[in-house]
Amino acid sequence: MIICATNMDYHLGTHSQRVQTQMNLEKDRASLLCMKALVSRGRLDSVSQQMASHPQYLESFLRTQHYILYMDGPLPLHYRHYIAIMAAARHHCGYLVSLHSAQYVRVGGDPQWLQGLEAAPQRLRHLDHINKVLAHQPWLTACSHIQALLKTGEQCWSLAELVQAVVLLAHCHSLCSFVFGSGADSDPPPYSRIPHGTPPGYCLCDAANGNTTVPITPNTPSERRPRRRSLDSSSDLSFLRERVPRPQEDRGNRDRLLHSQTSLHTDLEEEEEQLPCFADPSRFLTDPDFGYQEFARWEEDHFQVFRVQDYSWEDHGFSLVNRLYSDIGHLLDERFRSVAALPSPHGPDLKRAIWNYIHCIYGIRYDDYDYGEVNQLLEKGLKLYIKTVACFPDATKTPQCPLSWVSLKPTEKVHVNLLVMEARLQAELLYALRAITQYMIA
């Protein structure tokens, strides 16, 4: 959804009172959502914990993410998680790389591929260029990139597969911004502690969809049925030690790489175990020096401004993505609408300025918006923070703006990070879907 003046004007007569009332209701809703997600004595990862301050948005986010990773779609599950690893690696996001490495093996992926990008099939390696471009300079995305991936041959992609891959890349790139802005990259990977008897496939998305039914755990050992151990178990740790190959130069650091620095939150009667760290994100990178550059520099050459009046999410992107990847358009649109509807003590003008500023630094402009409002409403420190989180969410590099410089309350910081994530997601999708449209027309 494009955030513009016509769809973000609210009645502001008793705005502060309404915001306070809505926040109280949201707290109750957050508690209910967390109770469903935990299904007693569970644990939410730090990203979900922060998003839970906006439960309506969290539900929408979890539904979309679950659909992309696990529900109907042309790509096999292990491909989806490997693509997510590739996307997160562009920003050296160890948090997401660890998460999707674990899920990749869990759904049957070949551990050999976790040696690095060169160990993956050529078909996946072909995605590397568009992954790089979308992550750092999405305005470079061209019809020729789409054509190269869809050309006939054994390693080619179908249009439906490519659309799902592009959505997944954009989703993970933007999620890296939230992880970086929220500081979650230094926290444990999001593995949940779940009571014995909970189905292994149960996830937070089931809770968001209202599925909280879990089988009752038998009381006696003889009544217990065999339980599939998750990847955080000691048996799987041994399994991965044997199956994940290591390059020759890494063998001396094998133990260090196999264990993350974070402890699992387990049931009180279980011992604390360490999660395996499957691979350095740099193993899935090519051209590591390629990064964001000011769009204004390119504009002086031959890259034109992306005008929303010519290609918008509502009029073009939504219908295309929904036609080629069933139902994802509705789920993405719900996310954009949810973030636009978040209660804010600063009113709609600031949200609109943040959204349009992010699109502006990615070369997307609105003819009906006065960009003078950006400088009026966003102080310099906040602008630097937004640009850093949106364009440089890489903990391995010195940020343009130290995140601690910005004097934001925790709830305000979460709000800003959500706006950054969704605006960046939509920007990448617009560039990718426009290139696909151009390919289809040609």
Image (tube, rainbow, N blue to C red):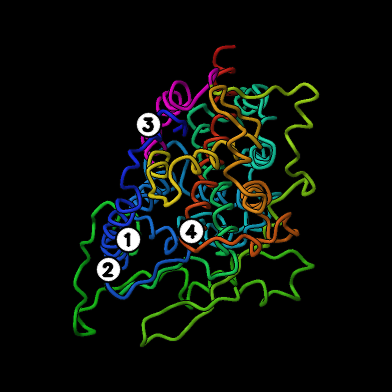
* Disc 4 from disc 3: Cα separation: 24 Å
- Amino acid type, mark 2: Val
For disc 3, the marked residue is: 326
Res 202 quadrant in image: bottom left
For disc 4, the marked residue is: 103
The residues colored magenta run 309-334
- Which residue shows up at 48% across the image and 57% down it? 412
- Please say whether residue 324 is one of the residues in the magenta stretch: yes
Viewer-proximal residue, 69 or 244?
69
Please state, as top left, top right, bottom left or bottom right, where the C terminus lies in the image: top right
* Disc 3 from disc 1: Cα separation: 23 Å
- Left or right, residue 56 beside residue 397: left
- Which residue shows up at 63% across the image and 40% down it? 375
- Amino acid type, mark 4: Gln
- Which residue shows up at 39% across the image and 39% down it? 337
Instruction: Name the front one of labels 4 and 3.
Output: 3
**Sequence-wise, which precedes: disc 3 or disc 2?**
2
CA neighbours of label 4 inside 10 A, class few (<14), some (14 to 19), many (20+): many
* Disc 1 from disc 2: Cα separation: 10 Å
User: Is residue 202 depicted above or below 132 in this figure?
Assistant: below
- Amino acid type, mark 3: Ser
| Residue 86 in sight in this render | no
Assign a secondary structure to mark 4: helix
For disc 1, the marked residue is: 202
Instruction: Name the front one of labels 3 and 2.
Output: 2
* Disc 1 from disc 4: Cα separation: 13 Å
**Sequence-wise, which precedes: disc 1 or disc 2?**
2
- Left or right, residue 93 beside residue 353: right
For disc 2, the marked residue is: 39
Point out residue 437 in the picture as x, y percentages from the top left corner. 54, 19
